[in-house]
Image (tube, helix red, strand yellow):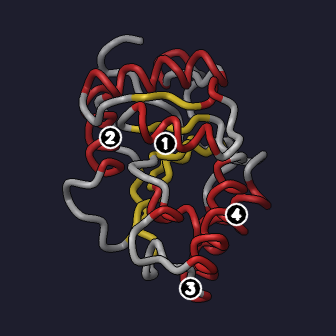
Amino acid sequence: MSQGACFVSLHAVVANVSPALSYALRMIAALDRVTGAAATLHRLPGPHPEVAPSAIFAAELLVSRLPDGAVTLIDGATLLNLAAALSLDDRRLRPVALVERLRWTEPGVGAEEAAARRHLEQGVLALMRVIVAPTAAVAADVVALGVAADVVLIATADETGARALLARLADRVGWLAAEEAAPL
């Protein structure tokens, strides 16, 4: 892929209050630099990663409005609230999870809440075309949920990681760069 190429309809869904140094935001910024185009950023309201009815409703509205075939980068913090909406639209979209850590394993989460989060994370990760993790340990945690290892990519949130993700996307699902696609 050449410098300056960009994907047709690249969207990113992040939590409304994502820390500036979050893995997802750093990876999205790296992709923007490598492709030379900015992803359309959608901030999902809600108390992520807690599951909340208002966040689920907002997720359903957002996902239904994304264009068909959109490459959709999803902040791992929002996955729990996106689970229901993505289960309806995963074939229409091309979802890619940017998973800094699994949310069901967070300290301070009770056993019942952890079990619910685990089932939601497991289900929504199974819908992803690619799952990007910053470390081998996080990738192993994802695979331990039953996700096929070939779906998981270990990539740093920098230009090197962004190029690795672009190569995986091109290889895995044949997304065309805008310079190679017909004009919109």
| Residue wearing tag 3 | 52
Q: Residues at badges 2 and 4 in contact (C-beta under 8 Å)?
A: no
Badge 1 local density, few (<14 within 10 Å), some, or many (20+)? many
Nearest to N terminus: mark 1 or mark 2:
1
Q: Earlier in the sequence, mark 3 or mark 4?
A: 3
Above or below 43: residue 121: above
**What residue did someone put label 2 on?**
27
Q: Which marked residue is nearer to the observer: mark 2 or mark 3?
A: 3
The residue indicated by pointer 1 is 10
Disc 3 vs disc 1: Cβ atoms closer than 8 Å?
no
Residue shown at 63%/27% (left/top)? 149
Q: Earlier in the sequence, mark 2 or mark 3?
A: 2
Q: Quadrant of residue 43?
A: bottom left
Return the residue at label 4.
119
Q: Give the foreground label among 2 and 4.
A: 4
At label 2, which amino acid type do we have?
Met
Mark 3 and 4 residues: CB-CB less than 8 Å, in contact? no
Label 4 element class: helix
